Image (spheres, grey):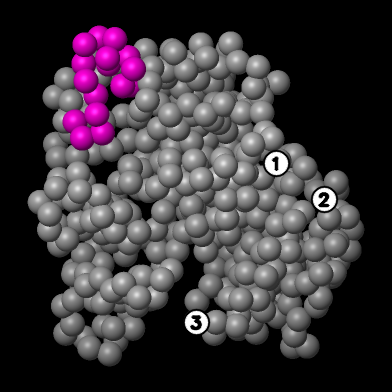
Amino acid sequence: MKEVILLTGPPLNGRDEYIEEALKLAEKESYAYYHVFEYLKEVGKERGVKITRKNVLDFAISHPDLMNDIRDEAFEKIRMHIDNSDKKFHLVSTPSLFRWGSGSVLGFTLSNLKLLKPDRVIIMLDDILSVRRRIINDPEWFERFGKEKDNIKLTTLVMWREDAINHVKTLIHELKKEGIEVRYILQFGIRHPYQTFIDLIFHEKEKPLVYLSYPMTGHEEEYYHRVRGFYEKLSKHFTVLDPGALDDWWIVAEYDNQVERNPGIKKIRIKNIFDGEEVEELEREDIEQATDILRRQLVERDFNLVDVSKAIAVYHYAEGISAGVISEMAEAYRTLAAIYLYYPFKRRPSPFMEFYGMQNPSRRTMFKDEDEMIQAMVEEKEYWAKV
């Protein structure tokens, strides 16, 4: 049976670059990849219109009716190619929605999705500081912002994300009314290893989705090294979703630290969390405006990952209780996901953590050995209740 997977998200989040690199690991898989922009260029050329990366936004805003016709025909061509293909998986990549100036450009409409009939929708996301740097390093986009770094506001970027996600949610809701069921919408951080993406797309039945929950802030490097090691071991058996693969919270944490030290500070210096070298100076007011949206997006994103997962693996290598972890365990309990808790300390955890952590399918226990917990998950996955 053919499966259609829509890969979408906000612009400039590295979606296509990530997908193309990941798919280098998929040589043995039965799939076809459809980049909608290539189809837009093809249809435009047939109609005597030259569509380029540089002019597509202005053209779409200036000539919306013609652009709508071109986009609709592009999706018709993709549907035809899917129908005529002997491949099992069909990956369709396009931005969701983009607002620029006084206009907006839709990556797809309800009628496009009714034609496409996606089985799954994966929203590809990158952290906002990386999106900002991607703009700065892209001559065409940097020119749109007047070649001034200060014009690229974090508030703008979090709203791009907000608009893109809401557009997807709205249309999938409407699809359901039309009797077309999408199995799930997943917000996927592109800091996940490429193999995780490959497992997500092609091996979900053999390696079911598992959410990795762990206290994320205020720990030493050795702690995160242990978490990463656990992730790698767990990933041998499951498709592991990591909230740390999309990490905007460190911007807020750094803002809080610097404001606490200097309440009158105007510029916040933020180091690149991945290379630890490059430093950006961001307007304090911009971070403050973006923070409220970021906080909500973080919670909604983590709950989304829990909601699509068959089980949650809590790696609590810290005695201090995390409100985020407890909330994720409660959400997992609510959505019928199996819950596994690694807590290697003699001191008892909070009664709430203990309650949720003792909901395993066939044994009421918490784990003090991480390998034992992984083995239990492998043995018990057939008993998990979540469809």
The Cα atoms of the two marked residues, 2 and 3, are separated by 33 Å
Of helix, strand and loop, which one carries label 3? loop
In this picture, which residue range is highlighted in magenta?
A: 40-55
Label 3 belongs to which residue?
Answer: 218
Q: Is residue 72 above or below residue 263?
A: above
Q: Is residue 194 above or below residue 182?
A: below
Q: Is residue 43 magenta?
A: yes
Residue at 26%, 77% in the rendered image: 269
Q: Is residue 329 visible?
A: no
Of helix, strand and loop, which one carries label 1? loop
Q: Is residue 175 above or below residue 123?
A: above
Front in this rendered view, residue 340 or 116: 116
Specify which label sits upstream in the sequence, 2 or 3: 3
Query: Which residue lies most toward the left here?
Result: 146
Q: Are marks 2 and 3 in contact (CB under 8 Å)?
A: no
Label 1 belongs to which residue?
Answer: 204
Residue 62 lies, in percent from the top left, at 14, 24
Question: Which mark, by number, is residue 381?
Answer: 2
Question: Which mark, by number, is residue 146?
Answer: none
Residue 6 lies, in percent from the top left, at 50, 31
Residue at 19%, 31% in the rendered image: 55
Kind of residue sitting beneath label 1 = Glu
Residue at 68%, 63% in the rendered image: 232
Kind of residue sitting beneath label 3 = Gly
Q: Quadrant of the N terminus?
A: top right
Front in this rendered view, residue 145 or 182: 145
Kind of residue sitting beneath label 2 = Lys
Q: Are marks 3 and 1 in contact (CB under 8 Å)?
A: no
Q: Quadrant of residue 377?
A: bottom right
